[in-house]
Image (cartoon, grey):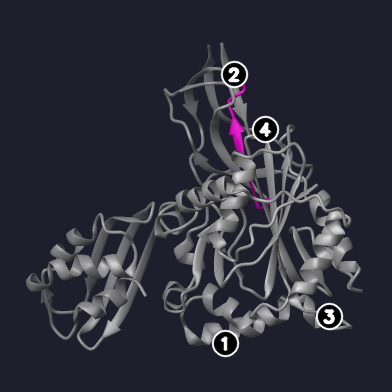
Amino acid sequence: MKEKITMPKLSDRMEKGVLVAWDKNVGDEVKKGEVLFEVETNKVVNEIEAPCDGVITDVYFEEGDAVEVGKTIAEYEVK
Amino acid sequence: MIYVDAHTSDTYLNFGCEYYFATEKRLDDTVFMLWQTTPTVMVGKYQNALEEINAEYVEKSGINVVRRMSGGGAIYTDLGGWQYTFITPNSDKTIEFDKYIGPIIDAIKTLGITAKFNGRNDLIIDDKKFSGTAQYIHNGYTVHHGSLLFCTDIEEMVRSTTPSDQKIISKGIQSVRDRVTNIKDHLSTDISSEEFKKLIVDYIMGHKANEYVLTNEDKERISALADKHFRGWKNAFGSSPAFSLERSRRFEGGTVRFRFDVKKGIITNCKIDGDFFGTGIELIEKALIGTSYNKADISASLDKIADEISIYRIDKNDLVSAAID
């Protein structure tokens, strides 16, 4: 089963977040709770964690991209 | 609320202390710190440090450079100001500013000063900023920190955070003076920086002596975390995102233009052109690839090939100044 990771809405006024760092690459196995990527919005750096175990299959944005809340950033195969 | 005082004005140890309480000594209650630094420029976690600071001035003046774990822009701090920190468990991982900033505004109100939150996470007095705030959320803990300008040297702030051009600096000082203010300038009764600290700590802690005193073991870990994550060129500059820059400078022998790609502080590509006369240009380009983008390393890389380069009326120091200053 594939799972989508979207840009989370981290505060009421957040519309976009900048994907500032990828901690994982396509093909990486990730464990629930591991940091996938980091998002900066409104002077806050947030670590976005994997919601469950799996393998990253696709990433749609690069470091430095501003991504709207709700857009798919990556997909992964749930284990 | 638990009060922690690292009893140091070492920038890196204070950042190490914050990080320690967010990552290793994770307490169930909120930790509050109020701390000072010797002159320091603090850049945001994903800022390009080289673009945010006047590297030459900062180096010459012995000003620390540190990369925060939090977002936002570059700020200047010195012993004329205070930094406050709240480190708190945050299981829902949401961003909140009001719950940290509210008590700071209330504490400042006891001095007869009406401060406001301007919506960009700055605190202002009469539209002038005296405090900036930022956060990072790490593994279920939020670290919220902010600066409080009490009697900070505004001119040093501008000199260390703007490009080296003297005209820009003069204009910058005026423009920053119009936008930034020190709390001390708004007091009806003069108080010392230490009295200000006591007032803020007492207000936030509610006069309760709930202090966690750092043990020697804590201090050792804090020092190790400070060295690993905050101190040194690699942490401050080597973690900058990838960037490209173009610089040119005119000398008696002609104009020299450098184009660099820099990744994690290391030059990954270098092209040189201009209207100078000389040989060995490809050697310079080659020698600089793999060199850290800082003055000492660039100079050392050029020294190694000095015998093979000959440019009419442009010497090694000229090249270094064209590449970086």
Q: Chain of mark 1?
A: B
The residue carrying mark 3 is: B186
Mark 4 residue type: Gly
Which SS class for mark 1? Answer: helix
The residue carrying mark 1 is: B170
Mark 3 residue type: His
Q: CA distance from mark 3 to mark 4?
A: 45 Å
Of residue B292 and residue A66, the one placed in the foreground of this image is B292
Sequence-earlier tag: 4 or 2: 2
Q: Chain of mark 2?
A: A
Q: CA distance from mark 1 to mark 4?
A: 45 Å
Question: Does the residue at mark 1 contact the one at mark 3 (Cβ under 8 Å)?
Answer: no
Mark 2 residue type: Cys
For the point 19% across and 69% down, the residue is: B302
Q: Which mark is residue A52?
A: 2
Which SS class for mark 4? Answer: loop
Q: CA distance from mark 2 to mark 3?
A: 53 Å
Q: Name the residue at the front extreme.
A: B216
x, y percent for residue B176: 66, 78
Q: How many marks?
A: 4
Q: Are marks 1 and 3 on the same chain?
A: yes
Q: Are marks 3 and 4 on the same chain?
A: no
For the record, the magenta segment spans A42-52
